[in-house]
Image: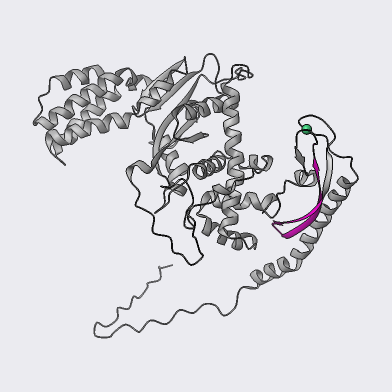
Amino acid sequence: MAPRRRHVRTPAAHLAPPAPQRPELASAVPALILMEREVEQQFRPRMIAALQEKVDAQAQALRDAPPPRCPHCDRAMKYKGTRCISWQTRYGWLKAFFRRFRCPLCGQESRPLLEALGVEPGQVAGSLARLLALLGAVVPYELAARLAGLFFSVQVNAMSVWRAVQRLGEAAAQYDDALSAYHADGRSQAPCASEAPAAVVVAVDGCALGMQVRPKRRRRSSPAQQLPPLPALEGGQFREVKTGVLLLPSERVEPLAGRRSVVRRFLVTCLGDADTVFGHLWARLCQLGWYGPNTVVVIVGDGAEWIWKRATLFVNRCEILDFWHAVEHAWQFARLQFGEGAAQADKWVHRIAQDLRAGKVVAVIERLRGLSASTPQAQVELDALIRYYSENRHRMRYDEYLRLGYGIGSGCVESAHKQVVHARMRQAGMRWSERGARRLLALRLLLLNNQWDQLDRLAMVRVAAEDRPPVPTAA
Ligand SMILES: [Zn+2]
């Protein structure tokens, strides 16, 4: 059959195209959507009623139980009265009467029903708190509150999301810190290393985060008073978020030629302290069972002093200077020597990169020493380059690292920064309090490490009043 020919009519050049029609929305919402909403409206009251029934049953069971014993001194606690509380869940508000107890000796308080339910008075609790924290860990709080309305048909404000993030983020951060402290202690159980891998790659790097200028919240003296605008952010108001990536070289795959990826990777992160991030790395290695007496820890870094200083923590290690940082350093000199955008610079750097990749770092340094710089400025850069390569030459045996499958770049940690920090915490105008950043980082880490379900087994931590966000716009 002959193919059908399509006649394309070209409009006559002298005719103006017809005026555009105003677009119209469909006059009705599709029936399925209406049905879904109807069913939800119909069953929501039944769900909250069923939930309330279960809570009442639990309260009744506890009412008949003997007074709890003090967790500190094991004394029987004293009954201090009954109170009523309400809290918000996925299906609506719940109410319960709970009994309070107090230890006569040490003052320890107990509210058995609330402890069993995992509820704090007047708060969002249960799975809704976890879902709000999840939204708040991914998008700014205002937007998270709107999404909660669209996703779960619950009315919450940005403060509720913020509170869920603080309370659960604090729980996650405390758990991380406790794990680090546990694994750092010599008395703790040594990591089970029977199946430890031959090599594990640890890539570490830092990136800047804008911090709040004032340690305390500004308060209005009257509701009408306008607060003056915040001062501009300066260099000193940045802190470094340090992030580490752990992966097994044996799990590197190449789904497409030249596009490497890893099956699994685990992230650790912290605000500021270099010892802390290495403590987290060590704890994570232990938790994963990735460290044994014969495991080589391959540390990839950009040449920052704090990384190599702590690398000595691992006796059996292989230090690698990130290949792209090494090449970028050569570029800095080449631009000055040959001029910005010169073809010769391109060729020169290409050859350096080739030789470095082939493991000829000593020959490269020799060649650089024999070079004469074109300008005094280029000379300064050349000296710096020679020094950089000389100091790091034992970390630049790239041929060997490639042969062993260790990899030569820290690209994985740079992409980790984007996921951990940039995607949520470095949007326009965002600045963070120390506590707020620490908590949000802990939650983002759970999410990115695919361990969000851990949050179900972490009790929400009460957050002090001074932790309130300093400005309503605080992300
Ligand atoms: Zn006691």
Residue occupying the far bottom of the picture: 15
Residue 9 in the image: x percent, y percent?
A: 32, 78
Q: What residue lies at 32% left-to-right and 17% top-to-bottom?
A: 394
Is residue 334 part of the magenta span, yes or no?
Answer: no
**Principal secondary structure, stretch drawn in magenta:** strand
Q: 305 or 227, which is in the foreground?
A: 227
Q: 219 or 387, which is in the foreground?
A: 219
Left or right position of 90 against 318: right
**Vertical position of residue 423 compared to residue 282: above or below:** below
Q: 450 or 54, which is in the foreground?
A: 54
Residue occupying the far right of the picture: 64
Q: Quadrant of ligand 1?
A: top right
Q: How many marks?
A: 0
Q: What residue lies at 51% left-to-right and 53% top-to-bottom?
A: 139
Q: How is the image coloured?
A: one colour
Residue 307 in the image: x percent, y percent?
A: 40, 26
Residue 337 appearing in the image: yes
**Vertical position of residue 200 compared to residue 44: above or below:** above
Residue 289 appearing in the image: no
Left or right position of 347 against 307: left
Residue 209 in the image: x percent, y percent?
A: 41, 43
Left or right position of 265 against 454: left
Q: Which residues are magenta?
A: 82-103
User: Based on the displayed image, in which of its 4 quarters is residue 459 positioned?
Assistant: top right
Residue 98 in the image: x percent, y percent?
A: 81, 50
> What quarter of the picture does the N terminus occupy?
bottom left
User: Based on the displayed image, in which of its 4 quarters is residue 76 positioned?
Assistant: top right
Is residue 84 part of the magenta span, yes or no?
Answer: yes
User: Based on the displayed image, in which of its 4 quarters is residue 108 positioned?
Assistant: top right
Q: What residue lies at 53% left-to-right and 24% top-to-bottom?
A: 282
